[in-house]
Image: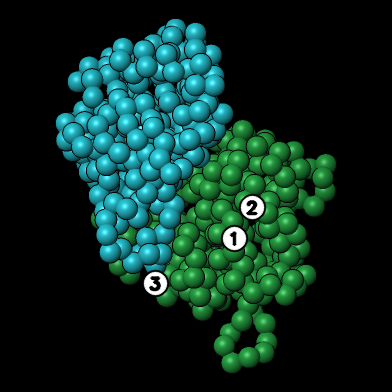
Chain colours: A green, B cyan
């Protein structure tokens, strides 16, 4: 018996509602975040991640209230990402009841921010989100960091970036394959394994889950410490309980 | 009403601890405070913590909380969480060595120092983050209705290795074995986060609120 591999449902929140886009477009409504989070908690989710995809700054406060409401009902770790750019943003989320924040674009623009954040709040609450896309050229596969919802290439190598973020004080890496996100074709296992084997901190695999088998693959073949999925849970296709039973059948240690 | 003081030394997610305690009992009044008088006045004291041990120990002195904490540690039901467990030992390796409160026997070490020959990082990601099992080493009122080997949520890079077996209440494996729950008399402390450990964590908090501080 040892540390369990985690299953993390992800709630994309836009203006106070859970939504799910396919490749960042075609957004479908999936319910009230508090209700959805409570349902996943009851099903045995190991953590819950909220991604605030609200574009307008007027709606930015909404996510704080969502976190407050969920944290009063759900007693498992909560992570919030999206629009985290300053120490004040982090403080607000932690005070609202988040346990971790996920930093993405702000880390690309100013990597030192990750160090400042972990010095201030501790590595345990700083997750760095990496959106990576496979790029052409060379014999070995290569992945690059993209920002702004996968639209803007940065030229930064994903594996080197993961190592640098861990060095600077990221306590965990949330790794999303932009090629797979929303496709339901499964994780980019080569990417996941390359990053998971290169960094000393836990890696959460994300992007592309369409079946329970994909979750198991992320752990066994991708060497991930946790798997994150959204749509397969949101529309009642599978429960977290089913996901964990399937993973346990594959010999993966899970919390049942 | 049981008055519970959650000691605030400026780090960590204290709202969750307070909310979780309120969630498990209607008969409590929870205050999150850095005021030594309110710690003195409380019936039960919770000492949570995240982040770095040096910051935690410094904050205890800067806020003038040491006397109130030491009094609580010897007189009333006291629950340390995460850094609140590590701070009870005499010494931590963190920050090239940090003297701590010295209430429990043993030291706090980096997880990689608990056992030799672990393949790092592949076999031992740090922080130790997620749900791990806690083997109950001693019976205790706070374990009531919780199975030995139940899973709790951990997130930490340093861990305690208790030297006095009677003070080791729970053990967890990660690379090597470490003290995941400790205590004696009126004192109980966990490396894991009961406030983030769903049903079993809430049970532990409910047991704590109901506890009179005796074995």
Residue ranking furthest to the front: B96
Marks 1 and 3, how far apart at CA:
24 Å
Residue B114 vs residue B185, the one in the foreground: B114
Q: Is residue A3 above or below residue A59?
A: below
Q: Residues within 10 Å of mark 2 (few under 14, many from 20)?
A: many
Residue B104 in percent (x, y) is at 27, 29
Identify which residue is drawn at 64% across, 47% down. Answer: A116
- Mark 1 vs mark 3, foreground winner is 1
SS of the residue under disc 1 = helix
**Which quadrant of the view contains residue B82?**
top left
Identify which residue is drawn at 53% across, 14% down. Answer: B35
Provide the residue designation for mark 2.
A114
Is the C-beta separation of discs 2 and 3 under 8 Å? no
Q: Is residue A202 above or below residue A37?
A: below
Provide the residue designation for mark 1.
A165
SS of the residue under disc 2 = helix
Residue A139 in percent (x, y) is at 59, 92
């Amino acid at each position: 018996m040892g540390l369990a591999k985690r299953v993390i449902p992800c709630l994309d929140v836009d203006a106070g509602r859970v939504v799910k886009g396919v490749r960042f477009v075609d957004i479908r409504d999936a319910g009230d975040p508090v209700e959805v989070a409570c349902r996943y908690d009851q099903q045995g989710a190991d953590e819950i991640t909220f991604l605030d995809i609200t574009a307008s700054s007027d709606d930015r406060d909404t996510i704080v209230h969502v976190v407050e409401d969920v944290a009063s009902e759900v007693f498992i770790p909560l992570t919030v990402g999206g629009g985290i750019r300053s120490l004040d943003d982090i403080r607000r989320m932690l005070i609202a009841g988040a346990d971790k924040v996920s930093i993405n674009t702000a880390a690309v623009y100013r990597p030192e921010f990750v160090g400042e954040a972990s010095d201030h709040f501790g590595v345990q609450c700083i997750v760095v989100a990496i959106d990576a896309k496979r790029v052409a050229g060379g014999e070995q596969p290569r992945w690059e960091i993209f920002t702004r919802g996968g639209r803007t290439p940065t030229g930064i190598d994903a594996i080197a970036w993961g190592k640098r973020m861990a060095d600077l004080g990221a306590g965990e890496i949330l790794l999303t394959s932009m090629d797979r996100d929303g496709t339901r074709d499964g994780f980019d296992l080569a990417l996941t394994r390359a990053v998971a084997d290169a960094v000393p901190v836990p890696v959460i695999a994300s992007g592309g889950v369409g079946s329970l088998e994909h979750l198991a693959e992320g752990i066994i073949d991708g060497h991930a410490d946790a798997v994150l999925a959204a749509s397969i849970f949101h529309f009642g296709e599978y429960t977290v309980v089913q996901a964990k039973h399937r993973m346990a059948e594959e010999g993966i240690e899970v919390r049942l | 009403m049981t008055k519970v003081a959650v000691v605030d030394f400026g780090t960590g997610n204290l709202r969750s601890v307070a909310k979780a305690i309120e969630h498990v009992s209607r008969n409590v009044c929870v205050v999150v405070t850095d005021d030594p008088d309110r710690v003195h006045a409380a019936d039960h004291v919770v000492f949570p913590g995240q982040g770095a041990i040096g910051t935690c120990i410094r904050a205890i002195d800067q806020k003038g909380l040491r006397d109130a904490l030491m009094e609580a540690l010897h007189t009333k039901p006291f629950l340390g969480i995460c850094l609140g467990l590590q701070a009870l030992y005499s010494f931590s390796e963190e920050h090239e060595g940090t003297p701590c409160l010295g209430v429990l026997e043993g030291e706090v070490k980096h997880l990689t120092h608990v056992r030799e020959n672990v393949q790092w990082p592949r076999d031992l990601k740090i922080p130790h983050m997620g749900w791990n099992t806690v083997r109950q080493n001693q019976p205790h009122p706070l374990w009531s209705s919780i199975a030995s080997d139940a899973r709790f949520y951990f997130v930490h890079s340093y861990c305690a290795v208790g030297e006095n077996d009677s003070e080791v209440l729970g053990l967890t494996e990660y690379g090597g074995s470490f003290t995941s729950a400790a205590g004696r008399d009126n004192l109980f402390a966990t490396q894991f986060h009961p406030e983030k450990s769903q049903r079993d964590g809430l049970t532990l908090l409910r047991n704590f609120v109901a506890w009179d501080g005796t074995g």
